[in-house]
Image (spheres, rainbow, N blue to C red):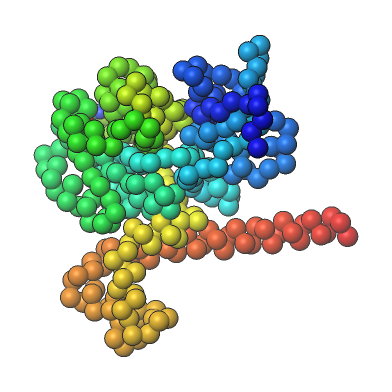
Amino acid sequence: MKQEHEKIGRIAAVRKNSFIILWENRELHAKVRGSFYEKAADQWPVVGDYVSFVHNSAGDSVIQSVVERKNLLQRPDQAKTGVMQYMVSNVDYCFIVTALNEDYSFNRIARYVSVALQGGAVPVVILTKADLCVDVEKFVREVQTVSDRVRVHAVSALRGTGMEALAQYLTPGVTVCLMGSSGAGKSTLINTLAGEEVMQTSTVRASDSTGRHTTTHRQLIQMSNGVSVIDTPGMREIGMARAEEGIDHTFSDILELESRCKFRNCRHASEPSCAVKEALADGTLSAKRWNLYLSLTAENSDYAKKKKAISKLAKAYKSEKKG
Ligand SMILES: Nc1nc2c(ncn2[C@@H]2O[C@H](COP(=O)(O)OP(=O)(O)OP(=O)(O)O)[C@@H](O)[C@H]2O)c(=O)[nH]1
Ligand SMILES: [Mg+2]
């Protein structure tokens, strides 16, 4: 319960155990109250969280609790240690930013779409640097085949083209999070939308078209039109973990096919009247899409197995210490 003297603000940035709270157009430095140290990692404030806090005008304010989240976007940490990284919360639209150069990857987009859908955010693929690409429409069409849940727009921040299509998402009170590789143009897009330089940007390496990790931490920016935008540092990869529902939503066409197989536990191997095999044979389902679904699902369940093994080891270690 929020006490009389507590205020509600929104987390704009997190640096280890220090937090920045946005409150009445001010940025306040804050720490969490001691009881947080007994809480699980996903209970700690992340960028996008609304928090109840006690204001301290002379020093750090103190976060008392995290207001119940609408959603939480997460991914496995890159070291694949079985630990999840809790990225951002209370996101309406997840802008999956991919440049129309060597950065473009159909498979990576499908991964981001699964993560966004798992977190309950609407995935919107933004193909940037359209000015560098000769056949933009081909890529737009291809992205549309990732999932019927995905929306896609091609833009050039450099030329200012395609930006007007993004206005439909940018309504007051909405939170948009931008994700994608370093150098894809996330911060540039935010600056263009804000109409001023709110984020620092820098040129990409000509050799491989990738960026230099200009944005180093997640940051929420409140724009004058009432939209909150979260910029994130470029990600090298996006692994699959705890994303089974997101994967199912992304590949809902495959789930629909599976439901039409004669046998409920059909492995789509040698069983008769298998709707998946039939769709693969008549071309309604491409082998590429089927294999992508299989590989994302396998990666996701591998993670669950690994996590189980780790917790088993941890339990054994604990009881050994006790005994
Ligand atoms: N040609 C072209 N260049 C662009 C466009 N948008 C961004 N860029 C350039 O791409 C480079 C990288 O842009 P950033 O906005 O810093 O990329 P970022 O995704 O924020 O990168 P990180 O912060 O490292 O994750 C800059 O030199 C931009 O000027 C575009 O539409 N067309
Ligand atoms: Mg950036």
169 or 210, which lies in front? Answer: 169
106 or 244, which lies in front? Answer: 244
115 or 320, which lies in front? Answer: 115
On the image, the x and y values in percent for residue 135 come to 11, 43
Q: Residue furthest left?
A: 134
Q: Residue furthest front?
A: 4
- Name which residue lies at 42% across and 63% down: 297
Instruction: For ligand 1, give the image quadrant.
Output: top left
Position of the C terminus, as image quadrant, is bottom right
- Can residue 231 be seen from the camera position used here? no
Position of the N terminus, as image quadrant, is top right
- Can residue 306 be seen from the camera position used here? yes
Q: Residue furthest top?
A: 58
Q: Would residue 11 appear left or right of 257 to someone viewing this image?
A: right
Residue 308 against residue 235 in the figure, above or below: below
On the image, the x and y values in percent for residue 125 come to 28, 43
Quarter of the image where one finds residue 175: top left
Residue 91 against residue 29 in the figure, above or below: below
On the image, the x and y values in percent for residue 146 come to 27, 55
Quarter of the image where one finds residue 168: top left
Q: Residue furthest right?
A: 323
Residue 253 against residue 100 in the figure, above or below: below
Q: Would residue 157 appear left or right of 312 to someone viewing this image?
A: left
- Name which residue lies at 58% across and 60% down: 306
- Name which residue lies at 36% across and 26% down: 226
- Name which residue lies at 51% across and 22% down: 23
Residue 305 against residue 61 in the figure, above or below: below
Badge count: 0
Q: Would residue 63 appear left or right of 285 to someone viewing this image?
A: right
